[in-house]
Image: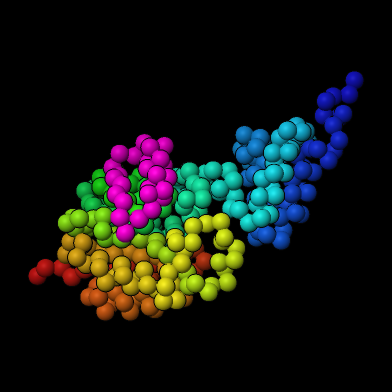
Amino acid sequence: MPTVLDQTDAADRIRQVLTRATARLHRVSDTPELDAGLLLAHVLDKPRSFLFAHGGNAVAPAKRAAFEALVERRRAGEPVAYLVGTWGFWSLDLAVDARVLVPRPDTETLVETALSLLPTDQPATVADLGTGSGAIALAIARERPNCRVLATDASRDALAVATHNAERLALDNIDFAEGDWFAALGDTRFDMIVSNPPYVAEDDPHLTALTHEPRAALVADDNGCSCLRRLAEGAAAYLVPGGWLVLEHGPDQGFFARHVLGRCGFRDVRTDQDLGDRPRVTLGMTRQVR
């Protein structure tokens, strides 16, 4: 007697459904196979490994329709992270939506640099300015439970996402405050300030592929440098002597970042490379009291 699978058209099975979707996503994604797999795994509520182990399984019509709808949204440029509602960053699974940027792997370089400077067994205070989804602040809070982290953002919507992520991750060594850059810090001085500010120039051609993400979190004036300059010029007043400022920037902005930190009196200034060996994070220390 034929099984239900035998009676199902081959075109409706996982393997074939993925193949068709991958072909349709080639023009809009650098990772069409991965995108298709993530979307189908989301619709089926299964891990992506299930798709490869059970490629001959049938996809029910309702599930297939839901998947096709997501593929069409992806073809229109919507990020996979928004479509599935969560995204991996560092060791975290973060809720994300159109109120915040999708966390990028390059930003893990900033987290790695920050952690290398923070004590592992002593308390310290860290401020993450422009936290967005909370990715940086939450990763530091998770890895350094002795640290107290303050995550700020000018966007109330972004802070709602970040606060939700902290609750999902059950992290209690992090606080949130609304305000533009230093406005939310009050009179507090921190051992470290970190930030992944907007640093994309207004005429950058890459923006055409980022139309669904909040533009205010991407674009900065002065060829993408205005926020980097503002952070460098204001940070020392909110850092303890010997405190660190750690900034993410574009791969062509390393020289500028080092120059402006040096001009603002920071010492031990250097730039760290990201996973693709591109200049990505520049840091410097405030002068210590003699």
Q: Can residue 252 be seen in this view?
A: yes
Q: In this view, does 215 lie to the left or right of 163?
A: right
Q: In which quarter of the image is the N terminus?
A: top right
Q: Which residue is drawn at 25% across and 66% down?
A: 235
* Closest to the observer, 115 or 192: 192
24 above or below 8? below
Q: Can residue 116 be seen in this view?
A: no
Q: Which residue lies furthest to the top in this view?
A: 1
Please give the range of residues in magenta: 154-180
Q: Is residue 209 left or right of residue 226?
A: right
Q: Where is residue 207 in the image (x, y as percent from the top left)?
A: 55, 66
Q: Quadrant of the C terminus?
A: bottom left
What is the quadrant of residue 9 in the picture?
top right
Q: Which residue is drawn at 56% across and 56% down?
A: 212
Q: Residue at x 73, y 38 (%)?
A: 65
* Closest to the observer, 84 or 192: 84
Q: In this view, does 240 lie to the left or right of 66?
A: left
